[in-house]
Image (tube, rainbow, N blue to C red):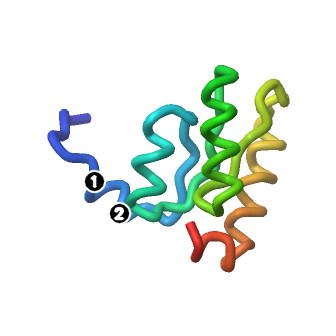
Amino acid sequence: HERLEDVTPLFEAADLAVAGAGFLGYELAALRVPALLVPVTPIQAVAAEALAARGGARAWPLGQALTPDALGAAVAALCADEAARETM
């Protein structure tokens, strides 16, 4: 692991991201990286839902259990939805 001054090239190379729903969600949307955003606070849930409503990401429901199976299913669904990924 090395310290990176600019993670933009890593984000741009990503096919999909699973990330917290804080400021990183906006960065991913600006770089048009398809993302599943996982909020941990109510204000993050509002931000994630706002991005999702505009097609900029998918939002994990705040308070819904984040199990490996549920997360895997959500990621698989996003991977299978090429049209949605293209608009993100």
Label disc, if present, on residue 46 of the rendered structure: none
Mark 1 sits on what residue? 8
Residue 82 rendering spot, x and y as whole percentages: 67, 77
Q: For residue 37, which quarter of the picture?
A: top right
Residue 71's spot in the image, x, y percent?
75, 44
Residue sitting at x 19%, y 40%: 4
The answer to whether residue 5 is left or right of residue 87 is left
The CA span between labels 1 and 2 is 6 Å
SS for tag 2?
helix
Asked whether the beta carbons under mark 1 and mark 2 sit within 8 Å of each other, the answer is yes
Disc 2 target residue: 12
Q: Amino acid at mark 2?
A: Glu
**Residue 36 position in % (x across, y down):** 64, 49
Q: Residue at x 59, y 73 (%)?
A: 87
**Outermost residue to the top:** 41
State the quadrant of the N terminus. Answer: top left
Please state, as top left, top right, bottom left or bottom right, where the C terminus lies in the image. Answer: bottom right
Specify the quadrant of the image occupied by residue 31.
bottom left
Residue name at image x 83 percent, y 43 percent: 70
Depth check, front residue: 42 or 67: 42
User: What kind of residue is marked 1?
Assistant: Thr
Residue shown at 68% from the left, 79% from the top: 83
Which sits in the foreground, 87 or 75?
87
Q: What residue occupies the far left of the structure in this picture?
A: 5
**Compared with residue 44, is residue 49 higher up or lower down, i.e. above or below?**
below
